[in-house]
Every structure is written in C-alpha cells, then in structure tokens.
Image (spheres, rainbow, N blue to C red):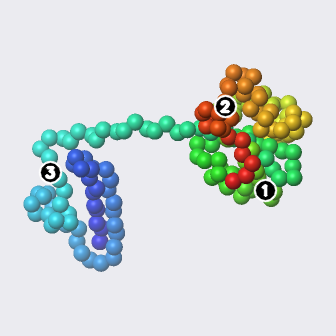
Amino acid sequence: MQIIRTTFRADGTPIGKTLTIQGGSTPLVRRLRPADAEDEEAYPVSSAPAAPAPRSPAKAKVVRTYLVGMEDSPLTKIGQTTGTLKSRLAQLQTGQPARLLPLLDIEGDYEAVLHARFSDYRVRGEWFDLTPLGDPATAVAGALAVLGLDIPREGQGDSSYQVLLDF
C-alpha cells in the first residue's frame, strides 16, 4: 500500500510530501473533494492561490578566529569557525594524539590576514611555529593591532577578544 501525505503551512501552502509504502492489498484512495476525506486526510482548500509564506532573513553567522596550541609542541593552529571554539576544539582533538589547548578566541574573520602575516612561520597548512616571536597569543594580538584591528582584551570594554588558558 502507498500512502502519500502532504504537509501544509498555516496559510495553506504545501511544504512537503511523504510517500509510505506498506505491504498489503489495500487500494490507494484518491479523494478530490475535501468533504469526502476523513479528518486525518483533510487538507485546506483555497479558491485563490496561496501567497508564499514570507521568509525571515537568514541570520548571519558570526565568524570567530582562534589560535590553538598543541601540548608539548611549539605548533599553533590559526583557524576560524562559525561555531564555538569549544566545539571546534573537540572536532580537531579527534585527529590529534596530543592534547590541544585553546590560546586565543577573536570575534571576526582574521584567518587569511594572520596566515599571510605569519607565512614565514608556517610549518604545514594552518599550523605555525610562532615561538620565535614569544607568546603566540600575544604575537597574534600584536599583529592585529599593527594592522589597525585594535581588539581590546577581555574585561577592557568589548569582550570580542579572549586569551584562553584552558576550558
């Protein structure tokens, strides 16, 4: 047996159909008049075509640039995420034998700028050895300040910049 169900919005416009196929010999029944349908099968009838439901504007995703260090290693990763640093760190940790440490979390998309600025310190991909510059988080914050992106530290006005030691 095949059952086709249509789901409707409150204004009567269809938003989806499902097809269920079940064993048995029950014939598929098609009802053309809503009055002939059982309540479960009822669907709204409109004499005029229904106007599409207004779409709400897509919520812009906030991009965060982060700096992650690897325990017992000079390597740091400069990356970006639209989620939280904690969830991104969990994703990255899956493929790493050493513990990853969050070092810096900045609201905004500065990944490409930072990759270009520290290209001489690139080890592989998004991994850099910034130890010749001192503390990696301080070096990255300093690079952003030189570029005119003065991001205040946490507790000094805006909280879009965080130096993280651990979760």
Residue type, mark 3 in image: Val
Residue at the spot of label 2: 152
Q: Secondary structure at mark 2?
A: loop
Q: Secondary structure at mark 3?
A: loop
- Tell me: residue 15, above or below residue 153: below
The numbered mark at residue 99 is 1
Q: Quadrant of residue 82?
A: top right
Question: Of the residues under marks 3 and 1, which one precedes in the sequence?
Answer: 3
Going by the picture, which residue comes out furthest to the bottom? 24
Residue at the spot of label 3: 45
Label 2 Cα crowd, 10 Å radius (few <14 / some 14-19 / many 20+): some
Instruction: Residue 14: give x, y in percent of width and height.
Output: 27, 50
Instruction: Residue 92: give x, y in percent of width and height.
Output: 71, 52
Residue type, mark 1 in image: Arg
Q: Residue at x 34, y 69 (%)?
A: 21
Going by the picture, which residue comes out furthest to the right? 132
Residue type, mark 2 in image: Pro
Residue 108 in sight:
no
Gap in angstroms between the C-alphas marked 2 and 1: 28 Å
